[in-house]
Amino acid sequence: MEQPLFTSLADYQEYPADEMTARAAEFNAEIRRRRSVRSFSSRAIPRTVIEQCIAAAGAAPSGANQQPWHFAVVSDPATKRKIRLAAEAEEREFYTRRATTEWLKALAPLGTDANKPFLETAPYLIAVFAQPFSIGPDGGRVKHYYVAESVGIAVGILITALHHAGLATLTHTPSPMAFLTRILNRPAHERPYLLVVTGYPADDAQTPVVAKKSLEEIASFI
Ligand code: IYR
């Protein structure tokens, strides 16, 4: 076994309690303004913003620091079109056959259907892939641990970073997503995890009226 190497927490930043309290409240207010958006403007956004937000996601903690993720960033109109057509084909199956009545009932308040024009309108689609293993220098498989948890945390940071930058997002999970592996030429062992659609909201974008659970409902202090 390799000996672990340690360094001091040189980048850690402590704040006085009142400042800490204010920062926590400000962040809560900022993140509570986040809404899933399904109607995007085609206005361009600087690629560097996407790069910075993905770099932020890449700082997520992960099982054994194995960073089992890949972010495929799509802005090419022809590729976005391919993704839209493939996703809509799966979604039509979902809405007409695969989804249970119970599932459709749960979804009803969101007003979604099989049409996904935003997959072409939004300037960027970020396809997130999870890597159950990597290929080691000797060509063998190196198993990754806590892959779903790790990628979920990274996507949470990605969405938060995009929101913080002033962009709208949609976490979109056309199911199944095997078409993403094919269209984006990803290795067969990577699992499409979800699509993050991002850009400015359309001027006339509407969002369903839904509520978040209260702190009392989601937390207990023991
Ligand atoms: N993937 C479908 C259905 C869908 C499922 C859930 I759970 C949602 O929260 C939203 C949609 C679609 O994108 O329409």
Image (cartoon, rainbow, N blue to C red):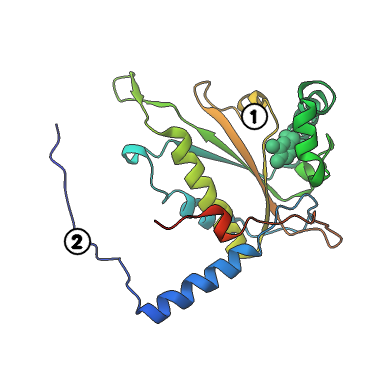
Within 10 Å of disc 1 (Cα), the crowding (few <14, some 14-19, many 20+) is: many
The answer to whether any part of residue 78 appears in the image is no
Kindly identify the residue that appears in the image at 63 percent across and 55 percent down. 213
Pick whichever of labels 2 and 1 is earlier in the sequence.
2
Q: Which mark is residue 180?
A: 1
Q: Is residue 217 above or below residue 135?
A: below
Disc number placed over residue 92 in the picture, else none: none
| Residues packed near mark 2 inside 10 Å, few (<14), some (14 to 19) or many (20 plus) | few
* Mark 1 sits near ligand 1, with its Cβ under 8 Å away: no
Which residue is label 2 attached to? 8
Is residue 46 left or right of 100 when viewed as pictured? Answer: left
Camera sees residue 186:
yes
Q: Is residue 2 left or right of residue 105?
A: left
Does residue 7 sit above or below 62 in this rendering?
below
Residue 199 at x, y = what percent?
A: 70, 55
Is 6 placed left or right of 74 in the picture?
Answer: left
Looking at this view, name the residue that lies furthest to the front: 222
**Residue type highlighted by circle 2:** Ser
Q: In the image, is residue 158 above or below residue 167?
A: above
Locate residue 26: give its quadrant.
Answer: bottom right
